[in-house]
Structures are given as structure tokens and as C-alpha cells.
Amino acid sequence: MNRILIVFSTLFLSLSVFGQAETKTLTVQGLHEPVTVRRDGRSIPYIEAKSDADLYFAQGYVTASDRLWQMDILRRVARGQTAEIFGKATLEEDKRWRTLGFSKIAEESLQYILPESRAALENYARGVNAYIASLDDKTLPIEFRILQYRPTEWKTTDPLVIGKILADGLSNTWRQDLLRAALQNLPKEKFDDLTDQVTPYDVVLYGKDSAEKKKAVAKTPGQLSTADAADDWVATAKDDDLRRTSLERVGFYVEELAASNNWVISGSRTADGKPLLANDPHLPPSAPGVWYLSSLSAPGLRVSGVTVPGIPGIILGHNQSIAWGATNVGPDVQDVYLETFNTEGKYKTPAGWETPVIRKEEIRVRTNPLKTDTEPVTVDVVETRNGPIITEDNGRRYSLKWTARDPKNSEIDAFILFDKAANWDDFKNAGRSFGGSTQNFIYADVKGNIGWYAMGRIPLRKTGDGAMPYDGSTNDGEWTGYIPFEELPHLYNPKDGLIVTANQRTVSNTYKYTAYIRDAAMPWRARRIYDLLKDKAKVTMDDVRDVQYDITNIPLLSLAQEIVKRNAASPETLNVLKNWDGQMKADSEAPLLVNEIRGCLANRMADDNRPVPAAVIRERILYWAVPEQSPRWLPKGFANYTEFLRSCDTSSRQSLADPKRFGPDESKWKWGSVTAANFPHPLAAVPFIGLQFATPKTPLDGSGQTPDVGSNVSMRHISSPANWDITRFVIPLGESGDPKSPYYKDEFEPWRTGTPQIFPFSADAVEKATRSVLVLKPL
């Protein structure tokens, strides 16, 4: 490949009718015709080209100019190449990703995607590489200079590999299979309590619940006892820790698959008679953030919104005709198989003993953080017909089957098609190709229609629904297909004019595909959002904004009221809780205190019911067991729940008063002490040099059970087809990944406070907002 030449022309200023905008021209090899890139006051790029090829080229070039190192670390994580720059500290993480084999799967995926998607990937890669070629040792982003390496050529498959990070963050359920198998030694009533998805707070969109519907308890494979399952579940903690660490580094670790709010409101409920659509994805905070704001324009295409740096097109946003948003569904798309191996290293199948595939992976590991020398470490990945061996314990080896490991499944086709969709039919047809982690996509269009479609590929099994590990020596766990697209839950112009999703169970317990609903999140956020909107008329954008920032915590308020009603705490605690309204305010003591008590209750219940995780009890049991005084969940040693609550109040106050935590001065017991904004950069912890990546540590309102989840709100979007020019979009930090840039963290305060940040769309509005112009000209 010839070196790409970048020729800088003379810098000049031009005066527009709306004000003075700095304009510069760059001559870039690889373009066919000039491309104009306007930047507004937040440095959002508005890219206008005369062809799709030049548009995606320019998008790659411009995105890399803001976020190149982030793009590089994303692909390195998914390809298992971080030890090459970080050394042995991340070697085990790389081994995990190499086991999943996403690099090879991405290469295979190229043959299955649409020609226009492949063209977008290729042109985007050319643009990224054009920018890389323009850099020298002095102009490389600071992270490359600190770590002493240059980025390698951007590959056409890199966006597909990055997509697998989203899949790992949003669809990882296989450990729950082993947990359910381990919990079968519990009394049936307790097992049913833990696995029952029905609550009084549910916001069900599709079907109606049946009181008679009972959850069948699946059986574990014959050779796997509940004790073995419990041991094996504990053994998987290492994999989970590695997954958490690597995903948190790039802002994609999503605990319990719960991530995001969205809703769409019919024009019959709004002030201007047109729909309103809102979306705020919840992903772990990071610097820079996981989203990048962009506007793309070419003949037949005009679209604005956010994308993940490294992925072409717009993932969430709107075009001239429709708007869309997404939240995670979290169905079971992973199965584990207990494989039987003999002394010769072969594994048992229904057809006899077979030799597994041994895939050799070579990982380059930096030997010294101050040098660039590396040494190879070879990893042998064992794969059966079901998938790679993902975990083993005491000779028991489990393989993993996962939709993300099928090269026919990717997100790119859907994203490229969403960007050009003109109506509901186009939107649905685009969604047929969506093979990523299943999402609740909401929709609104210029004709006033609203809708919701759960899109993704959810496997059907020969037997069962994937709730438990399968015996790999049989065909019981064979995948026979996917839930038909037409049978996935969806709504179009519902009578009540309101659709809310927040990772809750959206389908009734009579929905025939049980794998769809089994791992849904609790409905706290969905219920609160729905209750705030269900009776409200003449809804405005400000009303929607206020709902996004709501901080009422339903389960904690309920617990606090129960404590006060029972007089089940010290006078000091009762005085704090008696007038608390459930608001998770940063400057309040009550949220901190009642949350501590809730944690104590869950931990003691878990100690009595091992191996049930305290987190499961906290979410699934406490909200009803305490007010109902459930005898089967009251821990041993307590005569009643009042005594239990008082005990936890005492221990919680002692814990909070510990000098290593908050100390005895209750004036310092503030919720904001544990919810301060924290957007870590991967290099922030490095002594001295990490200080330059610092971000605000301001205490934040909100919690995991409120619509506003604090630092985890990765962006906020509100739009109406009535006027795309008043669309609101904000990200927590800023567009630039350069800590010296004025756009590194300039959006923090508007994001924190809810000050509207307008993302203009029409040509006139964009021109008025323009602060600088870059014209990319072909060589």
C-alpha cells in the first residue's frame, strides 16, 4: 500500500452571513470529491459528502482525529492484544478474549454482511488510515506517546470486533445457568421465589400475565450434582473478574445486563401534537465516554446521533424521517455444555468420541513497561462441537455456545439500514438483520407513528430453554433455530400512546419463549418512568428531561417506610427516615443509611441460603419478604423481622461510623460520598502522568434503581419529529479524547444539571451553529 499523502494548504478565514467561522483545507489522498466538515460550539462534526464512499471515509478520518487511542484500545481488548502495550497485568484478560476467538469470527462475518455495509467498513478504514498516516511522533495522541507505540493499520474487520465488546457487555448470561443448577438444592418455594419474574411493579407491554402460569424447574444433567454446580459456579468468578476488568477499562461492563431507559410518547399526549422520543443508555463511566456525537450527510442520507468510536454510521439517533433509541433486553443467548473427556483427550458425542479442535493463539506480552520489547505467550484453546472450553473445575469442563460467536450475527447491517429508514416498514426490515445483543428499539416518525420492536436473535433449543447447563455428550442442547422475527415482541401505535422500556420484563409470563424473559432486570426504573408519564397530558421536552433526571427510589423508599412503621430502628435512624421522600439526593443522609441497611439484610439472608448471591436477594426477595414477614426468608437467630431490621440498623450505623469509612460525625454521612462522578481513563492511575486525564469528581444525585443512575448515564437524547432542530443530545464529558482539548470535558456540567444541549439538524441550523469548517479535498 502506498503511503497516503496529506498536504496542508494555507489556513484562511471566511466570513459567513451568520458570523465568522475559521476555515481550513486539507488535501487527502483517497477522496473522490471534496467533503465539508463543520464543527459547532461543542466540536460536534457535521460531515457533508457527495457520496457514501467519501462520507464514511471522512467519518473514519474525523472520528480518529478525536478518539484514535480509544478506537485502538477497543479493538485491542476484543482481539486480546492489550498485553502488548500493558504487559503481564492484562495477559489473563487477553487469554479470555482469545478463547472467544472474535478476530477469526469477524473475518468470517465479512462474507455475510450486505455489500453496502462492507463498503462502509472499507471506506471508514481508509479514512482512519489516512489520519494515522498524517501523524508523526510529535502529533500522535498522548496515550501512544506515553506507551511508546504507533497504531497499526485500521482493518475493515475492526468495527465488527468492537461490536463483540457490546455483545459481551450486554448478553453474558452463561454463569446464571450454573447458578440456577446450584440453587436446586434449595427448597422449591425458595427456588421459585428467586426465579419468579412477576412483581406488582411490572410494566408489561406485550400480553397479559396469568396467575396460573407456573415456572417449570428444569433438571441438571445427570452427571452434574447441585454441589458440583455450586463449586463450578464459584470457580467461574475468575472469568467474571477478568471480564469485568477488561470491560470496565473501555466502559462496557454492565452489571446484571441492566442498561438504559427509553420511552416514546404519542402526539395525542404531547404539547405540540407530535411524538416525543427519549433514550438514556446506562453504561459504565469512562474517559473518554463510549459515545461520539456525529452528523452525516450525503445524497439520500442525512442522519445525526451517536456512534461508538470505530463503528461507521449512526447507532442511535434520527434521520429526516424517523428517530430511534434502544435499551438492553438480556435474553438467554448463551448455553454451557458439560463435556466428557477421556484420557486420550477426546470428548464424547452422540456419534462417539471425537477429537477437539486445538486453536493456538500467540499473545505478544510487553516485558518491561519502560520498553517496547515483547515476548510471545502461546495459548491452546480447546474447542468442541459446541464451542470453546470456557471454564473448568475439578476435571469438569464446560464449553460455550453463543450467538455472538456465529459469524452470521452482527449489528452493522441494521445500523447502516436504520440510518436510511424512512418509515416503520423500513425500520422493521432493517431490524431483521440485527444480530447483536437483543435490544428494545423504540421508534417515532414524522407522520406521528410510534412503535417498539425487540430485535435480536434468540436461540431455540431441542429440549428446554437453556436455563441449565446441558450434557454435551447428547443433542439435548442443540440449537434448532431462532425465535421468528414476526414473533418477537413489538407494538405499533398502541392505544394508550406510551411505550416505556428500562430493561424490565416487557412480555407476559404466558409468552411462549421463556428464554426471552428469564434474566430481565427488576422494574424499578420502568415503573417510576411510567407512573410519571401515564396520566400526564401536554408533555413537553422539559417534562421528558425532568423524568430522565428523576431520583425517586421505589425499593429504598418502601424499606424506609417499613422500618418507620415497625419502629424497627434506633431513634437516630427513625428521625432521619421518617420524613424521607425517597429522593436519592447527593447531600442527603437517608439514602446512604437505608441503602446500608438494605445491604445488611441481603447479606445476612444470603449467608443463610448459600450459594444464593446477596445481589439476587437484594433485588428479588427483600422488596416483598420484609413487608410480608416471610418466615422462610427470615434468617436463623431472629424472632421476627422487626428484630432483624433493628439488628441491621445497629450494624449499619457501626459500619458507617468506622473511621475508615465516614466516621462518627453523621453530618458527613452523605449519599454523594459514594456517588461522586468518576470517569476513569485507562491511564489515570499511572503515577504523575495520569493526572492529566482527571475528570470532575462532583457528587451526583441518583442510584441504580432510579431513572437517573448518576455516572452510568452514558448519554441523554430527546427528539421530536415536529422539529429535528431542537433535538437534545448530551454526553457526560466531551467529543475529544485529548485531555488538553477544551472539548475533553466541556459537556459535564450540562450533562449533570440537565441544561438543554441542542443538536441542530437542518442545513440552515447547522450553518448558524458552525464555529469552524474543515474542507477535505482529494489529492
Image (tube, helix red, strand yellow):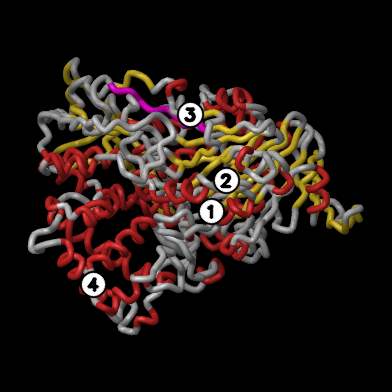
Q: Mark 3: few, some, or many residues within 10 Å (few <14, many ≥20)?
A: some
CA gap, disc 4 to disc 3? Answer: 46 Å
Residue type for callout 3: His
Q: Mark 1: few, some, or many residues within 10 Å (few <14, many ≥20)?
A: some
First in sequence, mark 2 or 1: give its number.
2
The residue wearing badge 2 is: 278
First in sequence, mark 4 or 3: give its number.
3
Q: Which mark is residue 349?
A: none
CA gap, disc 1 to disc 3? Answer: 24 Å
Residue 482 in picture, x, y percent from top left: 38, 22
CA gap, disc 2 to disc 3? Answer: 18 Å
Mark 2 or 4, closer to the camera: 4
First in sequence, mark 4 or 1: give its number.
1
The residue wearing badge 1 is: 547
| Residue 413 as seen in the image, left or right of residue 127 | left
CA gap, disc 2 to disc 4? Answer: 40 Å
Q: Residue at x 45, y 43 (%)?
A: 165
Instruction: Please tell me whether mark 2 sits on a helix, a strand or a loop.
Output: strand
Magenta residues, start to end: 452-461
The residue wearing badge 3 is: 490
Question: Are the two marked residues, 2 and 1, in contact with CB atoms closer than 8 angstroms?
Answer: yes
